[in-house]
Image (cartoon, rainbow, N blue to C red):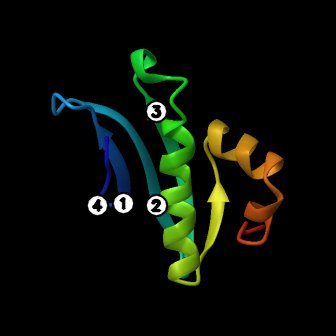
Amino acid sequence: MKIEEGQDRYFVYNDSGQEIGEITYSHPYKDVLSIDHTYVDPAFRGHHLAGKLLQAVVDKAVKEHKKIIPACSYAKIQFERKKEYQDIQYFE
């Protein structure tokens, strides 16, 4: 399974070509990404796909010198748990 980038989202397909997970984001402010949705098909949960999708957005933000608003519940929890994410979190 490979994570791919699309228009304001990252997604992953299984070996059969079926989309099994995605994370979406918007651009509410200049240099800020807002993660608004994370989903992994229940049959593929437990494989750390949501974490890998989140890391893809974090890597993008770091590379582009942007901050992140963790708006969806999954992103909020991960930003609270991982201290390394707190450096790129945007506070309104």
Q: Amino acid at mark 4?
A: Gln
Three-letter amino acid code of the residue under disc 3: Tyr
Q: Is residue 15 left or right of residue 82?
A: left
Q: Is residue 77 above or below residue 57?
A: above
Q: Earlier in the sequence, mark 1 or mark 2?
A: 1
Left or right, 66 with reference to 64: right
Label 2: how many Cα within 10 Å (few below 14, some 14–19, many 20+): some
Element type at mark 3:
strand
CA gap between label 3 and label 1 equals 14 Å
Asked whether disc 1 touches disc 2, contact meaning CB atoms under 8 Å apart, the reply is yes
- Residue at x 21% of width, y 32% of height: 15
Q: In terms of image quadrants, where is residue 1?
A: top left
Q: Which mark is residue 7?
A: 4
Q: Amino acid at mark 1?
A: Asp
Crowding around mark 4 (Cα neighbors within 10 Å: few <14, some 14 to 19, many 20+) is few
Kindly identify which residue carries mark 1. Answer: 8
Please tell me whether mark 2 sits on a helix, a strand or a loop: strand
3 vs 88, left or right, is left
| Residue matched to label 3 | 39
Task: Indicate the amino acid at tag 2.
Answer: Ser
Q: Earlier in the sequence, mark 4 or mark 2?
A: 4
User: According to the image, label 2 marks what residue?
Assistant: 26
